[in-house]
Amino acid sequence: MTGRDEGRQARARLVLRELWRAYGEVAETRSLACAPGCHVCCSDRVLLTTLEAGLLAEELTATGQHDLLALAARAPATPGPACTHNALARACLAGQEPPADPGPGPGDTCPLLRGGLCAAYLARPLACRVMCSLTRCQPGGAASQDPWWVTVDTVFLQLVEQVNAGGGWGPLPRVLASLGQGGGQGLAVCENLPGLPVPPEHQERLSRLLGQVFSRSLNGQPLGLWINRLRV
Ligand code: SF4
Ligand code: SF4
């Protein structure tokens, strides 16, 4: 990795952590049935960026869970979706049909689930942070979501993808395995944010929310500026 790449990686990590914090604060007001130990949603189909996987791997290493990291990276390869959040948004904004997506399928339990809890909770990817439900999920069932929060979650997922633009994205075992291979074989490529295809009824509220998020100070500069500088 060149010095320039390392600098970008360090900035991207800083921005990613700030986006996680911002999402956590925004979601504090959310009414949920989720509780510690509830883990029906913890599947190996969880999708994350290579940047997030790097932080996840660091957390597992720092907490002495090297074996679990190796095990998770060796978990059977799971199919990823046909396109990323920003690729989907780009197609939607251009009035194009998105690529056909067979869907995630049933999947297996996430390899990082230990005793009903996440082994790397502090570094869990955004896809896990946004996984919430108004009613307790049942095995094989779907989460129950408020449409406003679906919009907010999608926008934050788009922003996290932007932060890793040019990097990889895919299901957790495959992305963890790619970290040691120096490449993103088999992963989708994260894209720049093309815009936000938001339902009309959410646009004004979202604009206010993003105004607050982008004006957060990160090392003396607005978060929005940091995110924009990570465009490729
Ligand atoms: S999303 Fe569903 S399974 Fe996951 S913690 Fe919330 S209620 Fe439990
Ligand atoms: S990384 Fe943690 S929170 Fe996310 S699916 Fe796996 S066990 Fe659950």
Image (tube, rainbow, N blue to C red):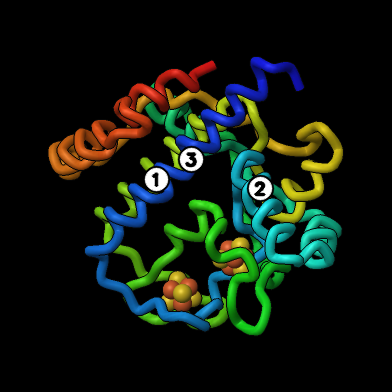
Can you tell which of label 1 and label 2 is closer to the viewer? 2
Marker disc for residue 53 = 2
Above or below, comparing residue 39 to residue 25 in the picture = below
Amino acid type at mark 1: Thr
Residue to which mark 3 is pinned: 16
What's the CA distance linking mark 1 and mark 2? Answer: 19 Å
Residue located at (33% from left, 47% from top): 22
Q: Please identify the quadrant where the N terminus is shown.
A: top right
Q: Is residue 216 found left or right of 73 in the rendered image?
A: left
Q: Quadrant of residue 15?
A: top left
Question: Looking at the rendered structure, which numbered label has been put on residue 154?
Answer: 1
Tell me what residue is drawn at x 49 percent, y 19 percent: 231
Q: Amino acid at mark 3?
A: Leu
Q: Secondary structure at mark 2?
A: helix
Residue nearer the viewer, 178 or 186: 178
Of labels 3 and 1, earlier in sequence is: 3
Please say if the residues under marks 3 and 2 sit with CB atoms less than 8 Å apart.
no
